[in-house]
């Protein structure tokens, strides 16, 4: 699957127009602040109906505007009008009057999860450093995305767990402020809470083991440092549904005193270890940056292993901080992809990476124009 074109309206600083992108490799060249990342964000928005920068929907509109949209045409193959799964090849995500709508082939889609099977994108960006040095929630978010791309059932289980968690926390808040006795409601919620939670933890534990088997060798190949592993620490230690239910009963008083659920998958932790020690804590800035980049590479490889499909890669200034040797090694281990979008500063040696059919665009003031670089 490739994006053959992108059209935006009032999206960030991008000029309202349609840009042809029907090539395996697309380079966006421009100074900082001109719109390169915004272009990638618009593509990502069409794949997930959200921003990879964590921006709220309303923040994506151009200054002075309230409504915006982004749409892509997709093809199954380059230079082929036949599209994946019989689709005519159109995805439109729009935000109007404070409401977001997803339209696929002129049909409104109520559940955004269907986008994941049509236009899977994997983005490499500066915000990925949060997976390494940020709070535990960001690492959980990353691995939840890894699993959701490969396993739609996991996404359903995660949603069910979050709904029960929300209800459980509401009951605990009521207890904290003396508004009601939460025990009858918690007695009804906790079996569901334990069931969904244990399913998530089992899948996370298996996924972390398999992901580590891809990630560790990949990091060694690029950096020369061996023994890096992904470590998963569940909130409930080796608990089945029955054990989790008993644990929740034992900790209910503490949960009520806090007014929030103190245990469960939303408290799980991931880390990166070497020889049993926390690798990220002692790593240099360069090693951490490489760690974040290779997490995304490993994600793309796992996606292919699980689905047999290649993703679209969105690479935002990923080569900028690497020396020549690491750049070559990084590019040599890029996974298979149907299409890749790269952003570069004008002074970078992007000509060294172009291919005969690479599309190169200059980005200036939100305007995307073809160039003969």
Image (cartoon, rainbow, N blue to C red):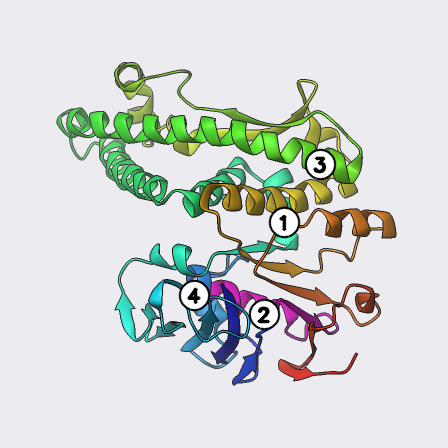
Residue annotated with mark 4: 57
Say whether disc 2 or disc 3 marks the residue closer to the N-terminus.
2
Helix, strand or loop under label 4: helix
Q: Which residues are magenta?
A: 24-45
Q: Which residue is mark 1?
A: 335
Q: Which numbered mark, 2 or 3, is in the foreground of this view?
A: 3
Is 143 left, or right, of 31 in this rendering? Answer: left
| Crowd class of label 3 (few under 14; some 14 to 19; many from 20; radius 10 Å) | many
Give the CA distance from mark 4 to mark 2: 14 Å
- Secondary-structure class at tag 1: loop
Name the foreground residue: 286 vs 63: 286
Q: Mark 2 and mark 4 in contact (Cβ < 8 Å)?
A: no
**Residue 154, quarter of the rendered image:** top left
For the C terminus, give its image quadrant: bottom right
The residue nearer to you, when weighing 268 against 155, is: 155
* Residue at x-position 67% and y-position 64%: 342
Category of crowding for the residue at label 4, using alpha-carbon neighbours closer than 10 angstroms: few (below 14), some (14–19), many (at least 20): some
């Amino acid at each position: 699957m490739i994006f053959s074109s992108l059209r935006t309206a009032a999206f960030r600083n991008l000029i309202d127009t349609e840009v042809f992108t029907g090539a395996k490799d697309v380079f966006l060249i421009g100074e900082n602040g001109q719109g390169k990342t915004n272009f990638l964000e618009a593509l990502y928005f069409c794949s997930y109906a959200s921003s990879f920068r964590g921006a709220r929907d309303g923040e994506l509109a151009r200054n002075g505007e309230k409504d915006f949209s982004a749409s892509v045409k997709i093809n199954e193959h380059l230079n082929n009008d036949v599209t994946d799964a019989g689709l005519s090849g159109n995805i439109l995500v729009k935000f109007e009057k404070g409401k977001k709508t997803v339209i696929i082939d002129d049909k409104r889609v109520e559940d955004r999860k269907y986008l994941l099977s049509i236009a899977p994108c994997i983005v490499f960006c500066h915000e990925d450093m949060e997976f390494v040095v940020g709070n535990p929630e960001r690492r959980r978010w990353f691995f939840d995305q890894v699993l959701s791309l490969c396993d739609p059932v996991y996404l359903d289980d995660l949603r069910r767990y979050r709904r029960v968690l929300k209800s459980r926390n509401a009951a605990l808040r009521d207890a904290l402020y003396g508004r009601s006795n939460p025990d009858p409601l918690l007695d009804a919620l906790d079996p569901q809470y334990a069931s969904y939670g244990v399913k998530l933890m089992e899948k996370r534990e298996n996924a972390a083991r398999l992901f580590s088997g891809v990630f560790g060798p990949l990091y060694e190949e690029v950096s020369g440092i061996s023994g890096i592993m992904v470590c998963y620490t569940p909130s409930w230690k080796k608990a089945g549904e029955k054990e989790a239910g008993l644990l929740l009963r034992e900790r209910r008083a503490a949960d009520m005193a806090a007014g929030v659920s103190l245990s469960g998958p939303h408290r799980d932790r991931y880390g990166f270890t070497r020889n049993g020690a926390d690798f990220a804590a002692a790593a240099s800035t360069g090693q951490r940056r490489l760690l974040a980049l290779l997490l995304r590479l490993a994600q793309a490889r796992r996606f292919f292993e699980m689905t047999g499909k290649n993703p679209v890669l969105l690479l935002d200034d990923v080569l900028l901080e690497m020396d020549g040797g690491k750049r070559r090694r990084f590019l040599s281990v890029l996974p298979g992809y149907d299409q890749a979008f790269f952003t570069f500063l004008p002074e970078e040696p992007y000509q060294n990476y172009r291919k005969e059919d690479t599309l190169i665009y200059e980005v200036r003031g939100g305007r995307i124009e073809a160039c003969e670089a």
